[in-house]
Amino acid sequence: MIALVVKLFPLIIILVAAILLLALTLWKRNSPAKLRDIPALTRLYRMLGLSVEDGTRLHISLGHGSLLDARGGSALAGLATMRIIAEKTSVSDMPAVASSGDPVLGLLTQDTLQAGYQAAGVDEFYSHTTGRVTGLTPFGFAAGAMHISRNEKVSTTVMLGHFGPEAALIADASDRESLTLIGASDNLSGQAVLFANTQDALIGEELFAAGAYLGAGAAHTASLTVQDVLRWLVIAALLGGAAIKLLGTI
Amino acid sequence: MRVFTAVIAIATGVLILFGYFFESFALVQSLLLNWAIILASVAALVGIFNLTVVHMDKIRRGEKGGIYSALLVIGLVGTLGFGILLRPQHSAMQMVLNGIIIPAEAALLGLLTISLLYAAIRLLRRRPDMMSIVFLVTAALLFLGSATLPFGDIPLFGVLIRPWVSQVLALGGARGILIGVALGTLTTGLRVLFGVDRPYGGR
């Protein structure tokens, strides 16, 4: 019996999270989101409007995380953010360009960009060359993404997804062109590199908060609350475990 | 059509999730993942086609940096053509791999070292706060503890300070960050399972 509970424990956590997410989404759908200030995401929101006004484009780089393994979560969060950006910048003379280093992610990038254009009612403006697979290895991908920042009238580079140390090359290319850089990675090396290269750093789970800050809807805001609840449960479990271990040794 | 794709995506996600917990779903999970791997391989071809189209477009329109696009397309077509004709194991293809592709990536890795050093130097100018100071001091401590110095190791750095910083402070912080990322991944996955986020073409 205990073995079965242990085996199914992750599923129980997922079910609890799912119920919480549904309940909070329904509860919060009509109330405005109250979010703490994250300077990087505030800057991103501001840059969305500015890029449309001054005729420059945003470069959204989604990294090289495969959707077939654990790195897919950050890629999906990046796609959700890109969907909002595409919708808000689709009417610009210079629409957003997206780059990725994984072919499956590349396909979803194009589909998501098109969905953003459709939602804005300007489906005819969509060009399939705005979603690009710039390389199939981490450095190949970075080399291709650097090219976009330098040559395509970009004002802001947004890096959301799975990046390793090669993120420094894209960040450096953006820095040389004096572009605004906003970046977050689910990889610790990539995160350290982006911390050193960005004006305002995004740490850890802040990568997954971008959608909520750009107004993606009640489900994204509810996700943040669910993360907070689960985080407190993890803290309680860690402290409880430490206390039990301490009591066991006394 | 959108409802149909959403139903397929959600059903597939649920079946794969159940495969991790129930034996009866393991076979279906394995089958679906195999299909996904085959489709991912086809997507690689689509990705290469997309890359070629983008760069051909740049050449056609005479955009800035078009010469690099031309070099890329020539390199791509040449490597693909010779690869099909000679097979990847052929000595000429191995020479291309060992003489061009691996050195080019190694050069980028070397460039990365300079970029990181430059970023660290500029960090205090870009963001002069306590976190930046802590970041740089930690990096300096780890370098001093692991670098081979001409006058030998600095006392205490290699045996006490570096292990303590990397295995206690940094490891604790890293675990915290990774737990946060895991929770974010969980809620993102749930949104996709519920069909709220549809990266497969929903409005």
Image (tube, coloured by chain):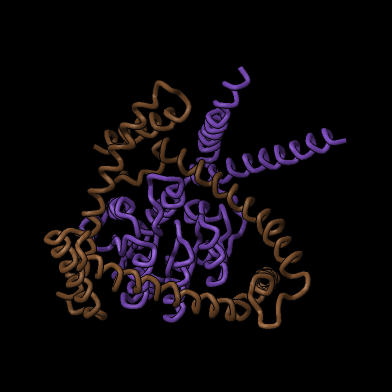
Chain colours: A purple, B brown
Q: A173 above or below A92?
A: below
> Is residue A52 something one can see in this rendering?
no
Quadrant for the N terminus of chain B in the image: top left
In the foreground, B65 or B109: B109
Q: Is residue B142 visible?
A: yes
Which image quadrant is residue B65 in?
A: bottom left
The image shows residue B144 at horizontal and vertical percentages of 68, 74
**Nearer the observer, A188 or A93:** A188
Q: Residue at x 35, y 65 (%)?
A: A141
Considering only vertical position in the picture, is A182 above or below B63? above
Question: For the view shown, which residue lies furthest in the left direction?
Answer: B85
* Front in this rendered view, residue B126 or B103: B103
**The residue positioned farthest toward the front in the image shown:** B91
Residue located at (42% from left, 76% from top): A173
Q: Position of residue A119 (x, y in %)?
A: 31, 50
Q: Name which quarter of the figure residue B69 lies in.
A: bottom left
Q: Quadrant of the C terminus of chain B?
A: top left
Which residue is drawn at the image coordinates 28% and 70% (left, top)?
Answer: A93
Nearer-the-camera pick, A24 or A75: A75
Q: Residue furthest right?
A: A250
Total marks in image: 0
Measuring from the top left, give residue A155's x and y in whole percent: 40, 74
Q: Is residue A184 above or below residue A211?
A: below
* Relative horizontal placement of residue A216, taking residue A206 as reference (left or right): left
Q: In the figure, is residue A106 to the left or right of B55?
A: right
Q: Position of residue B40 (x, y in %)?
A: 28, 47
Q: Residue at x 21, y 59 (%)?
A: B88
